[in-house]
Image (spheres, rainbow, N blue to C red):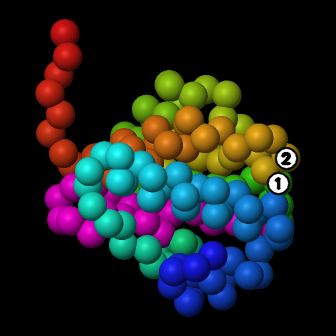
Amino acid sequence: MEHAPAPLLALIAKWSGPAQQGLWACRAIFHDVAGAAGIGDLDESLKWGQPSWRPIKLRTGSTLRVSWDSGDPDHLPLFVDCKTDLASRMRSLYPDLPQNDGRRCLAVDLTQPLPEQAIAHLAQMTFCYHLKTASVG
């Protein structure tokens, strides 16, 4: 995919075809969410050897990472900061995701259609984590 950092491209080239497709779909969702939320550009890099996205603007949001392991080829794990409540909130909102440890790791099943709504919601909550939002009702 064009405009992705070279280290990310080199890492992803080693992943399976379905994992690469899942990553690129997630990446597109992440950038769409950031644009729709008006938070600006995302820093795209490798953190802990995993593709990582975080708002460039300080005190906006948290980091969202994606990984893949050939030992579990049918799942694409997404990682959030373990000091947040994001995984726990996602567990309540999307109990049908195949894996969620409630702390930092959620996974999507690469043999099923990508749960785009859940991924977009996770990205929105992650990238806007530090923003104050008005309470409704």
Q: At 55% across and 61% down in the image, what residue appears?
A: 27
Question: Along the horizontal axis of the image, is 63 left or right of 46?
Answer: left
Tell which of 74 and 7 is nearer to you: 7
Q: Which mark is residue 111?
A: 2
How far is the residue under mark 2 from the one under mark 1?
A: 6 Å
Percent position of residue 25, x then y: 64, 56
In the rendered image, the vertical position of residue 74 relative to residue 100, given as above or below: below
Residue numbers of the magenta segment: 52-70
Q: Nearer the viewer, mark 2 or mark 1?
A: 2
In the rendered image, the vertical position of residue 92 relative to residue 100, given as above or below: above
Tell which of 102 and 134 is nearer to you: 134
Percent position of residue 38, x then y: 26, 51
Residue 53 shown in magenta: yes
Disc 1 marks a residue whose amino acid type is Asp
Q: Which mark is residue 60?
A: none
Disc 2 marks a residue whose amino acid type is Thr
Q: Is residue 84 visible in the rendered structure shown here?
A: no
Q: Is residue 54 visible in the rendered structure shown here?
A: yes
In the rendered image, the vertical position of residue 124 relative to residue 49, given as above or below: above
Q: Which mark is residue 74?
A: 1
Q: Which image quadrant for residue 131? A: top left
Tell which of 80 and 14 is nearer to you: 14
In the rendered image, the vertical position of residue 92 relative to residue 87, given as above or below: above
Q: Are marks 2 and 1 in contact (CB under 8 Å)?
A: yes
Q: Who comes first in sequence, dot 2 or dot 1? A: 1
Percent position of residue 44, x then y: 43, 74
Q: Secondary structure at mark 1?
A: loop
